[in-house]
Image: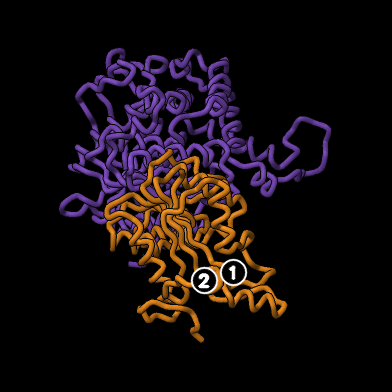
Amino acid sequence: MNENNAIGTNSVGIVAPQTAHFNAPLTLKSGAVLPQFTLVYETYGKLNADKSNAVLICHALSGTHHVAGKYSVDDKYPGWWDNLVGPNKPLDTNKFFVIGVNNLGGCHGSTGAASINPATQQPWGSQFPVLTVEDWVTSQALLADYLGIKQLAAVVGGSLGGMQALQWTIAQPERVRHALVIASAPNLTAQNMAFNEVARQAIITDPEFHGGDYYAHGVVPRRGLRIARMLGHITYLSDDAMGAKFGRKLKDGVKYSFDAEFEMESYLRYQGDKFAGEFDANTYLRMTRALDYYDPALPFDNDLSAALKNVSAQFLVVSFTSDWRFSPARSREIVKALLDNERTVSYAEVTAAHGHDAFLMPDKHYHDILHTYLSKIEV
Amino acid sequence: MQTTVTNNVNITNSDAQFRQDFAIIANWVKFGSKVLDLGCGDGELLQFLRTGMEVKGYGVEKDDANWLACLNNGTNVIQMDLEDGLSGFEDQSFDTVILSQTLQAMHNTQEIVQEMLRVGHEIIVTFPNFGYWRNRIQITNGHMPVSKTLPYEWYNTPNVHLCTINDFDQFCKKYKITILERKVITDGSEVNFMPNLLGNLAMYRLKAI
């Protein structure tokens, strides 16, 4: 099937989100209990008869369940990983049943800080618990149960999503056959966490944050969120990529002002404004905290090899040469721990100029890698 | 022209030599053992060893196209530059570490051999013998050798550390590396008489003292 519909070549087409409600209380890693929760998700392709072709895509910091396709023909943009998922694309929906899910604590329909706390009938706000990668995997496994899927053919994720893919293999070793861990790390370095702290401080010190209970005041900490996102964007690009994209280009000459005179400035402001208008600050705080806390080796005396001892999934680990926020060296730590356990693993270090953002780009060699690996998975 | 001393295996083309090369390596690795092939190319040797010796194999390859070929034929392959050493591999974590016809292209020759000895119980190193008589003739005629085992011109060769069998023997002596076994082949046949003159491809099975 080489589809060429109104949405574009090889698109999954028009999609719609679905909702799953979970009424049993969920005890989180922190000890906090969510009395009930909702996950919003999308699926692409068909689940086969023996339910062996399901692939879960885990999103990163600002991702959503909307991985591929469009909600209407007029939609300006498709889902965030549309270049990967679709008929005859690397993650081929003719073969696989692909699931995108908005993580718990997210702000695109799954239960989060803006949701109503059943105990108070008010938005959770500051009272919404801090979540961990482990909690996300637990809730995603409950979604798999809900969909009747005992074992995933693969879990795929980049960045924070890659941490979830790794965690799946640790926490649910019998429920995942393949893990594709892309532009990720087994934990964050101090420098990486430092960026998160600056981002959080920008939000928390915004006068309109109100300790996280800004919903009640009818405001959002827009300035803080905007700065947090601007900072993030700097770290997702390489120096070279920024140089190639903007260089020192001016929009309209030097004005001796503090307006957005350089093109780089207007790019960052645009990205910051766009994000501040659509993302929830409490979600941003919790996503960055989940990144900070993830450290599967910690209970094993910082021995990642020991942490991966019971892993049985096969791995594809991919990093990008210009990614300095999740550098190739961090991916190689995962590879080494897998080699120490004699697991099946291949590792690609893709030459790419785009920095951390490269994992979302349709680079030919990168997509050839994913296509080749995924095409060999038996379903 | 075949003037080399040969055993009774009558193989003369270069493909057959590759098979002879692989056959000797297969003979040197233990059945079901754990093997690391450095500079594994498209994974052909590891495929051969997986099929014939049921080894648990991993390859290391830098080149994108070769790496992808490995992935495609089911070889576990790690993309990295051997010049950076083998820091991703634990001491004595492999039964055999192989460097097949890659030594001559390494800048850090001594370092990679020491790293192999650190990671593997035994190592296998093979390289084109620069002392082979056909190479000597080309030098005598005033040119850098170009042949099936040295297929490059002087200006585009990746080979930076070509050596002879005598040179490599000295290298092993100097760095206290034990030669467990050595085979020399030319056009698929073993060479036992004057190997440094008549041998095209040198194959060593080594271990640290």
Task: State the residue at coordinates (62%, 53%).
Answer: B107
- Vertical order, B37 against A61 (above or below): below
- The residue pinned by badge 1 equals B131
Residue A56 point in image, percent of width and height = 32, 44
Instruction: Locate the C terminus of chain A and report the quarter of the image it occupies.
Output: bottom left
Q: Quick one: label 1, few (<14), some, or many (20+) residues within 10 Å?
A: many
Q: Which mark is residue A62?
A: none
Q: Are marks 1 and 2 on the same chain?
A: yes
Q: Quadrant of residue A283?
A: top left
Query: Can see residue A294?
Result: yes
Amino acid type, mark 1: Gly
Image x and y of residue A320, in percent = 53, 46
Q: Which chain is orange?
A: B
Q: Nearer the viewer, residue A301 or A52?
A: A301
Q: Chain of mark 2?
A: B
State which quadrant residue A265 falls in.
top right
Name the foreground residue: A12 vs B79: B79
Q: Tell me which residue sits at (56%, 32%) in the image.
A: A229
Residue A114 shows in this picture: no
Q: Which quadrant of the figure contains the N terminus of chain A?
A: bottom left
For chain A, what colour was chosen?
purple
Look at 36% across and 37% down and name the residue there.
A166
